[in-house]
Amino acid sequence: MTLQFKNVKKGVAKNTSMVDLSILIQVSVEANSELINFKITSCSSSTSWIVTWASGTSRSNDLALKSSTKRVLPLGSVACPVTKTEEGLYKTCSLKDLPFGFYHSSHVFCYLPLPVETSFPVHINGSFAVTSDRRRLSCKTVDDKDSFDSDWNEALMGDAVCNAYILF
């Protein structure tokens, strides 16, 4: 399976202290005959995406600056598939309508995909705190004395990811 990326820069904020970036990206997936053992025949697909990144501006930024033991980055993004209309404009499309090789439901990513689904109409990416097996986001349990990882995930989702979603 190969991925090909073609980046087109769409916009960058003038304020260098805050990340505010959107790009249009073309992602192509190709399955070749090497995957026949997995019952995947040769096929390929390509989809355009709008990806928007934003930095945290309140709680996640404060946690990042105050944390002396954890090195965290208050950065989040959302990604949504788009199609080009006859007028040359882009409109969003449902994740359910994506071709082979793409998730058909919203997932959380910590740079790589996690087996965590959401009810949002977009994919969510961020520098989340995850469990050591990368199966879920870290969360507070009754035995935890320190809940930084859980607090961090909540702050990142409510701040940086929310900012990226609003910018989208």
Image (tube, rainbow, N blue to C red):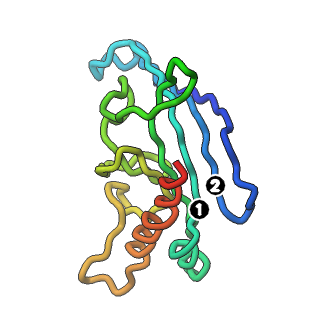
In the image shown, does 72 or 119 lie closer to the viewer? 119
Secondary structure beneath label 1: strand
SS for dot 2: strand
Give residue 15's mark: none
Q: Which residue is drawn at 38% across and 12% down?
A: 42
Q: Which residue is drawn at 46% across and 47% down?
A: 112
- Quick check: 101 above or below 146? above
* Mark 1, residue position: 55
Image quarter of residue 101: top left
Residue 162 locus on image (x, y percent): 47, 60
Residue 155 position in % (x across, y down): 45, 71
Question: Quick check: 24 above or below 110?
Answer: above
Q: Identify the residue shown where x is 32% and y is 58%.
A: 136
Q: Which residue corresponds to the image point at 56% horizontal and 69% vertical from the top-left?
A: 72
Would you identify the image quadrant in which residue 122 lies? top left
Q: Is residue 95 positioned above or below 15 on the image?
A: above
Q: Which x, y percent locates residue 158?
A: 43, 67
Instruction: Give yes or no for contact between labels 1 and 2 (Cβ–Cβ under 8 Å).
Output: yes
Q: How far across and how far down the image is residue 149, in percent?
A: 42, 73
- Which amino acid is tagged 1? Ser
**How many numbered circles are shown?**
2
Residue topped by disc 2: 20
Under mark 2, the amino acid is: Asp
* C-alpha distance separating marks 1 and 2: 7 Å
At label 2, counting other C-alpha atoms closer than 10 Å, the crowd grade (few under 14, some 14-19, many 20 or more) is: many
Extreme residue in the bottom direction = 145
